[in-house]
Amino acid sequence: ARDFYHEHVEYRNEQIAVLDDNDEIMYMLSWEVNKITYPRLSKKVTLNLYVSDFWNYAIDSPRMDFDYIRDIDVFYFENVEEYSVAATKVILKHFPEKKIYYKDKMARLFFEDDVIIGEPEDLEKPGDDVATKNSGDDAATDRPEDKVVIKVGSEMIYHIDFGSYVIEKKEANSINLMSSLYWLSDNISYGERNPDKTFYIIKAPIASSGLVKFISFLIFFVSVAQRKEEMNVIPVLDTAIAGDNNQFNDGVYKNVWEMFFKPVSQYSLEEVYNSKNVIIGQEGKMGANPYLMHVEYYSNIGPLMKEYLVLNDEMEAYCKKVRDGLGIEKGAKVLGVIGRGSDFNNPGVARLHTLPLEPQGIVDKAREVYNGGDYDYIFLATEDQKVFDTFMASDLRDVTKFIEQKRYEIDAKKELLHTRYIAESKAGKRNGYEEAKVYISILEMLRRCDGMISSTDCGAVEYAMSMRGEEFDYLYIHGADSNEYLKNKLAQE
């Protein structure tokens, strides 16, 4: 049935009758797309992750990745279907010591005595609080001796903990397993160049991501690919995505990364797209791959940004010119203040961040630190008009430097900043490239400040901390003393 639908795409919208030797109908076949639901949102919500069909998988593919399944001891599959059967074959071949259970008795037709029909005794019950092992190159090493038992069902399960997606090795679905196994396996030939090399094209939509999120997301994939030394792949970034409604290239089909930064590889996209061995990654569907989620959660993005993020020559010259125009003499001590507001005041966004300090609270904190820290200037970075106005109406006005940028007043309960950006771009009122240049010049100034205050955790403070290369004389991030995710992040960085 699988091979039939693979070869005959034209029949995927039809039901196919399967006949016995007497031409009597035994049953009907139908084909449908794998759908992934997210119970944390609603069982009625389906997000299209563009999951690979895995048509050409083989259980001995040379670039299979076993890191996710390696430390799982027991697999409990609820259903017999194509991917559960395929994943089971992989486990039996490469990890014969692991135990495999099936709730579905039909598994006997495929595996006879190689699997156990029934539920494992040590399967975690709802409400249990059993620690699980973690994976990933930067994963925690304190692992309990308890067996890791994973239930493989029909729904995609993940949890949001302090802003990071974490797949706990308790529940998954067969698409998760297949994604973790084959995410580096799909080899495409675009030409005959570089037959001795394999390129991994990291190609993902930017969508609503802000600049720093977009940077850290792509750099994370570059680092993951380079860690896979045994896979022998060369990562290349391609952020020109047709129809990508992002805030940087105003809908123009253009490689956003190279608009601002130098390539992460010596190979041009033109050369890569004429090469013999090319892998198209699964970045746009990372939610389907629990291995990538694990590694991202345990990765410290700071050193990775420092290693891979280099401004191109045009941006480097632009940022220097902007800094020189601030009138800050060489050797002056500067306190950086990040007044993040606008859409960060949205209750939904605040689940992933601490709600920002109120504008007057930012001014009061800046005054306290400025007066007690022997600073010469304050450098203010904010896109929030209320924060800016409050600051400039205070007694700190005369010592405050800033870079001109667009600032907004937004009702965070009704609108997000990305939505405003896109609307302005469509109306011809915004140039995404020019505004991103201004924002990068602000980030580059922030990382050169001596002290730092931020009204909450955000991309600007992450960039400044990552790219500075040394500790700030003073660092305050509102919420870092109460937000567990922030505390862990600061401890890593």
Image: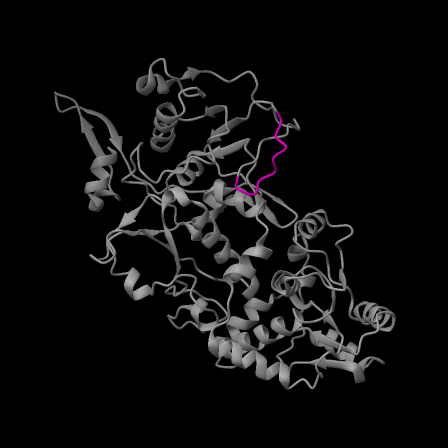
Q: Kindly give the residue lying farthest to the front in the view shown.
A: 331
Q: Residue at x 35, y 43 (%)?
A: 33
* Magenta stretch: dominant secondary structure: loop
Q: In this view, does 386 lie to the left or right of 462?
A: right
Q: On the image, which quarter does residue 465 sit in?
A: bottom right
- Render colour scheme: one colour
* Residue interval drawn in magenta: 136-144
Residue 202 seen in this snapshot = no
Q: Kindly give the residue lying farthest to the top in the view shown.
A: 113
Q: In this view, does 207 lie to the left or right of 440?
A: left
Number of numbered tags placed on the structure image: 0
Q: Residue at x 31, y 46 (%)?
A: 186
Q: In this view, does 451 lie to the left or right of 168?
A: right
The answer to whether residue 142 is magenta is: yes
| Nearer the observer, 312 or 22 | 312
State the image coordinates of residue 67 (x, y, percent, origin top left): 46, 36
State the image coordinates of residue 283 (x, y, percent, origin top left): 44, 52
Q: Residue at x 66, y 65 (%)?
A: 412
Q: Which residue is drawn at 69% across and 86% down?
A: 327
| Nearer the observer, 457 or 354 | 457
| Nearer the observer, 19 or 443 | 443
Q: Is residue 41 left or right of residue 70?
A: right
Q: In which quarter of the image is the N terminus?
A: top left
- Looking at the image, residue 403 lies above or below residue 48: below
- Looking at the image, residue 454 lies above or below residue 427: above
State the image coordinates of residue 173 (x, y, percent, origin top left): 46, 34
Residue 39 seen in this snapshot = yes
Q: On the image, which quarter does residue 356 sit in?
A: bottom right
The answer to whether residue 411 is magenta is: no
State the image coordinates of residue 195 (x, y, percent, origin top left): 23, 52
